[in-house]
Amino acid sequence: MGVVVFLAYLTGGLCLGEVHPFSRYPMYSNFPNWAYVFYLTNQHDSVIPAQSLQFSSNQLGHMYYGICKKNGIPVGDGKETAQALSKAGEEILRLIAERNKERSPLHKTIKLKRKFFSLNADSTLNCIITTLGEKHW
Amino acid sequence: MKSIGDLFKADLYSLTEWRFIKSSFVCVWLVLIVRILLTYNEVPMPAGFCNLLLCGLLLNGVSKFILILCCTVLALLYVLEFKMQFTALVLFVCSAFVFSIEESNGVLGRSGLISFIFLAQWLAYMLYKHKAAEQVYSAAIQFSIQAIAAAYTLSAVSKISDSGFYWISQGKLMKLQVLKSYEAHYASTANKEWLLKGEQMAGFIDSHPVLISGLLLATLLLELCAMVAIINKRTALFYGIALLVMHTGMYLVMNIFLFSVFFPMFVFLLNPLYRTWKACLTVIPRTPRKVN
């Protein structure tokens, strides 16, 4: 049967893109001049390990991009409006609370923050921290 | 003169090789499926197969435990080689729905390859149903390897279409993504060692631009030529080793590890359990037979 499966998966990936079970596998297919890292802090702004709330920082990022895509919010390079950030933050914090609803709360307050990294022309690093939202237990 | 079909005609795999491959593949698959079903309770952003059916119904109360039970039974049937034309297809459907649930929660794990492998195996069992058993197993493995090779080729095509061949010269911008990756580990664990490691690795990338470009070029070529892995068993093994080195390098430099692509590659191209078992057989001396 030759290479029928190879061609089928290649064609599916190229034509349908990110539709399960296909993908274009575009991870790091370009290196933009910006990067976001999402993290959680408590009321004293100390970092809460996302794993302690059954998440990873990358999952928070994936959720952020998914919510922005769903709501038609243009994303990347710090161009999101404060309103858009607040909307995404509220939804992510709701999902965090939902996944941890059967556990006793470890923190009175959880803040969701975003670090926005970019490189200046002289290759020095620029970092802006924004709070997307907070939830009280 | 050899035709293209002859060039890619796989040499045969043994039943033992197939048993080791499918057992290890389906066991890890089952762990992934159970973890997803126990983690998620809703589908806030329907994606993939969850656009076809209300996946929320699969997560309601007892239904998720019934699904876990079904998947466990199917995995067992798969290992026992029971009615594979049915089993592989249903495994594909279950796999696609469950991984879609994860994607519907905003986690783009890109696990489509794992689901697609079941579909490729179903196709092998359908097309080779009247052939000798050994040919059916070999086709199932060969078709799975073809899907894996296609995934790597797609990754290379994405890089070329998104960045062109300039991708290999973007080491300076790669520094930013490396820092992000280590920062993300810090945010996940609150362990400050990750920040230190990130700074060290970013410094290394800054001071070795030629080496980084060379590594990026090697990665791009390896992914682009992944079709070589489907020529025969030997090329599959050598390509598997090369990809293992590539994934190890990516983990060491960028601290990223894409399990959903690495795991099928590791199992189907390298078949580590089978090789360990064979090594054990050669190391452990056989008991000499008594001669009367």
Image (cartoon, coloured by chain):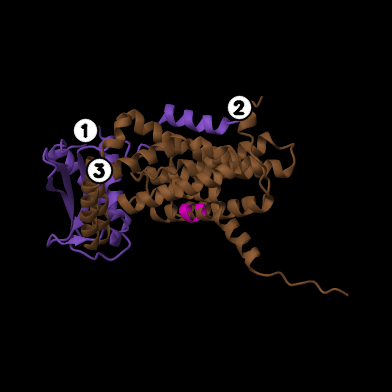
Chain colours: A purple, B brown
Q: Secondary structure at mark 3?
A: helix
* Residue at the spot 50% in from the left edge and 40% down from the top edge: B148
Magenta portion: prevailing SS class: helix
In which quarter of the view is residue B45 placed?
top left
**Between B117 and A31, which is closer to the camera in this rendering?**
A31
Q: Is residue B53 above or below residue A130?
A: above
Which of disc 3 and disc 2 is earlier in sequence? 2
How many dots with numbers? 3
- The numbered mark at residue B209 is 3
- Residue B134 seen in the figure: yes
- The numbered mark at residue B4 is 2
- For badge 1, the amino acid type reads Pro
State how far apart marks 3 and 1 are (Cα): 33 Å
Q: Secondary structure at mark 2?
A: helix
Q: Nearer the viewer, mark 2 or mark 3?
A: 3
State which chain disc 3 sits on: B
Q: Which span of residues is magenta-colored? A: B29-33
**Between B167 and B44, which is closer to the camera in this rendering?**
B167
Q: Identify the residue under disc 1.
A: A74
